[in-house]
Image: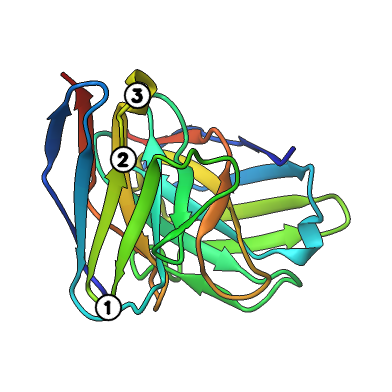
């Protein structure tokens, strides 16, 4: 099983600042990596797929990068509505696996 | 607009059974693989099962293999998860999630709001 690890566990960012979230895979997943945002009491929402492609309707302030084992989600000019937990997910191999999440708090 | 609406959750005793359902609308259901993903309270997301667009192939997490069965009805646009021999550790919100492709597991581009399954005596 491919283990996904995310860092940091919690990130406090002021509105307008940049947030940088990291995700590592225990083995290469090429670019088969997605990022999701989950707000309290809500279902996850796909932000990024293929490591760097924004999903439909996702604002340009969200960007993804990386390949292989190291990935980054960057949120430029953080907005108050961007609070929540962010998960990475690999789909290179079965079982599909998710990271433990990074909670983004608005400072 | 893609809509996924889960139902069938509830309280069940250990060893019991439950059948979850997901009603899909707003897209060509028969063209896409579908998944079940669960989330225990305060825990990370855990993928449970996947089914191809035509009803196969099917894939399962080791934690549910042999106990859960995923099926779909492409006439009525419904996805199902039959759960047997339920354990306390199966307690979670179960989400129905649309895959981005017809076969295999990929990014999950639409999710339902989830249905809560509680396994307790």
Q: Secondary structure at mark 1?
A: loop
Residue A100 point in image, percent of width and height: 21, 50
Alpha carbon of mark 3 to alpha carbon of mark 2: how far?
A: 9 Å
Residue A40 point in image, percent of width and height: 36, 24
Residue of label 3: A79
Which residue corresponds to the image point at 40% horizontal and 77% vertical from the top-left? A92
A102 and B17: which one is in front?
A102
Q: Secondary structure at mark 2?
A: strand
- A44 sits to left or right of B53: left
Which residue corresponds to the image point at 41% horizontal and 61% vertical from the top-left? A52
Which residue corresponds to the image point at 22% horizontal and 36% vertical from the top-left? A18
User: In this view of the protein, can residue A65 be seen by the observer?
Assistant: yes
Residue of label 2: A75
Which residue corresponds to the image point at 71% horizontal and 41% vertical from the top-left? B2
A33 and B21: which one is in front?
A33
- A7 sits to left or right of A31: left
**Disc 1 versus disc 3: nearer the observer:** 3
Residue A99 point in image, percent of width and height: 25, 55
Q: Picture quarter containing residue A102? A: top left
Q: Is residue B98 above or below residue B115?
A: below
Residue B68 point in image, percent of width and height: 50, 61
Q: Give me the chain letter of mark 1.
A: A
Location of the N terminus of chain A (image quadrant):
bottom left
Which of the two discs, 2 and 1, labels the residue nearer the N terminus? 1
Here the colouring is rainbow
Residue of label 1: A68
A101 and A57: which one is in front?
A57
- The answer as to whether the residues below labels 2 and 1 share one chain is yes
Which of the two discs, 1 and 3, labels the residue nearer the N terminus? 1
Alpha carbon of mark 1 to alpha carbon of mark 3: how far?
A: 30 Å
């Amino acid at each position: 099983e491919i283990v996904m690890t995310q860092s940091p566990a919690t990130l406090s960012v002021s509105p307008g600042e940049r947030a940088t979230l990291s995700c590592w895979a225990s083995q290469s997943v090429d670019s088969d990596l997605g990022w999701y945002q989950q707000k309290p009491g809500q279902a996850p929402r796909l932000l990024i797929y293929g490591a760097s492609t924004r999903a439909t309707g996702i604002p340009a302030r969200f960007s993804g990068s990386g390949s292989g084992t190291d990935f980054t989600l960057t949120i430029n000019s953080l907005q108050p509505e961007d609070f929540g937990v962010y998960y990475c997910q690999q789909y290179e191999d079965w079982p599909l696996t998710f990271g433990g999440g990074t909670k983004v708090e608005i400072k | 607009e893609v809509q996924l609406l889960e139902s069938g959750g509830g309280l069940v005793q250990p060893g019991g059974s439950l059948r979850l359902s997901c009603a899909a609308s707003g897209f060509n259901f028969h063209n896409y693989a579908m998944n079940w993903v669960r989330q225990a309270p305060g825990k990370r997301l855990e993928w449970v099962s996947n089914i191809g667009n035509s009803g196969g192939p099917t894939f399962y997490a080791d934690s549910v293999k042999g106990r859960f069965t995923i099926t779909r009805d492409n006439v009525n646009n419904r996805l199902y998860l039959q759960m047997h021999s339920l354990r306390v550790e199966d307690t979670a919100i179960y989400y129905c999630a649309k895959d981005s492709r017809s076969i295999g597991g990929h990014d999950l581009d639409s999710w339902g709001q989830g249905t809560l399954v509680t396994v307790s005596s």
